[in-house]
Image (spheres, rainbow, N blue to C red):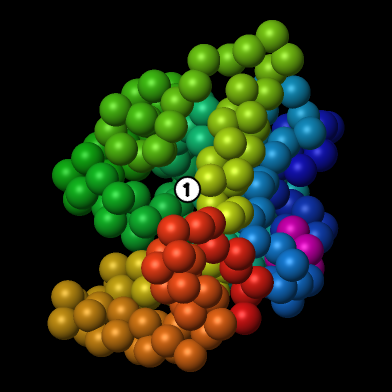
Amino acid sequence: MNRPSARNALGNVFVSELLETLAQLREDRQVRVLLFRSGVKGVFCAGADLKEREQMSEAEVGVFVQRLRGLMNDIASSAVMGLIETTRGLLPGAGGTQRLPRCLGVALAKELIFTGRRLSGTEAHVLGLVNHAVAQNEEGDAAYQRARALAQEILPQAPIAVRLGKVAIDRGTEVDIASGMAIEGMCYAQNIPTRDRLEGMAAFREKRTPKFVGK
């Protein structure tokens, strides 16, 4: 993301470009891991573009927030972070009131949203809001390098199994445990006929590294 004049704030054009890019990448079976990186030094994303939002009609705001919510269904972020909407006379509209309680619990989510408190990366890590917190390096890309290292761990794994695992987790956490088990079962069944599953079993038997092809 590279919109330095607005600190990568999410405006209409920017959101449209991100959604279009995601749609293209979703159809590219050669892509196994996707990293979102800021090209603006010192900031990942400033949130919604409130200057642009101020010029919108009520109807336009509704449409924009719906599109932004769709974008946030596909990506997530970190560093100094917070849902600060209540400090601007707003409330989180891109899914924050639903995702944060599922991640941290209702009581803590209410505290953070009601106060509009900002968290450091270390604080977010302690709370379990982010998986990793890293000290900044001289190049200013420590988080990116950690993300690349994590991507390198994911890349060798069976891509269909990873994709279906993501579906099972994302959809299963939105329903009760019995329904979640059913979703997992359906995802597991889709993976059974894949060449990668047979390759994994053969590699285990032959004591070698598997070579997955995504089929």
Majority secondary structure in the magenta region: helix
Vertical placement of residue 117 versus 209, above or below = above
- Residue 152: % across, % down: 60, 44
Residue name at image x 74 percent, y 52 percent: 11
Q: Give, as a single range, the part of the protein colored magenta.
A: 18-22
The one nearer the camera, 110 or 192, is 192
Residue name at image x 56 percent, y 82 percent: 195
Which quarter of the figure has residue 165? bottom left
The residue that mark 1 highlights is 90
Side (left or right) of 28 relative to 171: right
Which quarter of the figure has residue 201? bottom left
Residue name at image x 52 percent, y 74 percent: 199
Which quarter of the figure has residue 9? top right
Image quarter hosting the C terminus: bottom right
Residue 3 visible here: yes
Residue 170 visible here: no
- Residue 184: % across, % down: 31, 79
Secondary element at tag 1: loop
**Amino acid under label 1?**
Leu
Image quarter hosting the N terminus: top right
Side (left or right) of 87 relative to 177: right
Side (left or right) of 49 relative to 159: right
- Residue 128: % across, % down: 30, 38
Side (left or right) of 163 relative to 139: left
Going by the picture, which residue comes out furthest to the front? 206
- Residue 37: % across, % down: 70, 40
Residue name at image x 54 percent, y 52 percent: 154
* Magenta stretch: includes residue 2: no
